Image (cartoon, grey):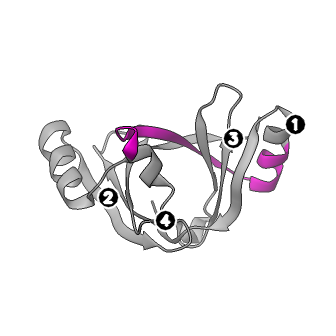
Amino acid sequence: MVFGKFHHVGVAVRDLESALASYTGIFGYKLQSGPYDDPIQKVSVCFLSRGLSGEPLVELVAPLNGGSPVTGVLKRGGGAYHWCYETQDLDRALGEAVEAKFVLISGPAPAVAFGGRRIAWVYAPTLQLLELLEEARPEEQRA
């Protein structure tokens, strides 16, 4: 598979501000970027890092409105619910994923938090939700 580098783990939270206070106070994370409101994905997100080389980011994901897909995750208690892999060729990665019996949930679609880079969502045969993120070109280095 051409999924590439493990980029971040997504954590469903009810409120970014209070979750950010917890993650900085308890785990020593610092805000790296955001918050971003993404009307396409219907979420508000921010990215956290502890500044350790090679360590993936933590993405806090809160519903932007009542129709947010993260609302269902929060009804089940919230917490870590998706992994994100950055890939050089999103279309190829999706093709390989579908061939490997992954289920395409949505996308590709542009994401505000990634400067318009496209993302797509798939369920792995192991029932893990994965976000696939188009790799940034050198001039687009953001979260």
**Residue matched to label 1:** 99
Q: Say whether residue 8 is left or right of residue 21.
A: right
In three-dimensional space, the C-alpha distance between marks 1 and 4, rounded to whole angstroms, equals 31 Å
* Residue in the foreground of this view, choosing between 68 and 25: 68
Which of the two discs, 1 and 3, sits closer to the camera? 1
Q: Is residue 29 above or below residue 16?
A: above
Please name the amino acid that badge 3 sits on: Phe
Which of the two discs, 1 and 4, sits closer to the camera? 4
In percent of the image, x 38 and y 46: which residue is there? 74
Judged from the image, the secondary structure of the residue bearing numbered disc 2 is strand
Q: Position of residue 134 (x, y in %)?
A: 66, 58
The quarter holding residue 17 reads: bottom left
Judged from the image, the secondary structure of the residue bearing numbered disc 3 is loop
Which of the two discs, 2 and 1, sits closer to the camera? 1
In three-dimensional space, the C-alpha distance between marks 4 and 2, rounded to whole angstroms, equals 27 Å
Quadrant position of the N terminus in the picture: top right
**Residue matched to label 2:** 32
Crowd class of label 3 (few under 14; some 14 to 19; many from 20; radius 10 Å): many
Q: Earlier in the sequence, mark 2 or mark 3?
A: 3
**Residue matched to label 4:** 67
* Residue in the foreground of this view, choosing between 114 and 51: 114
| Contact flag, marks 2 and 3 (Cβ < 8 Å) | no
Q: Position of residue 143 (x, y in %)?
A: 45, 59
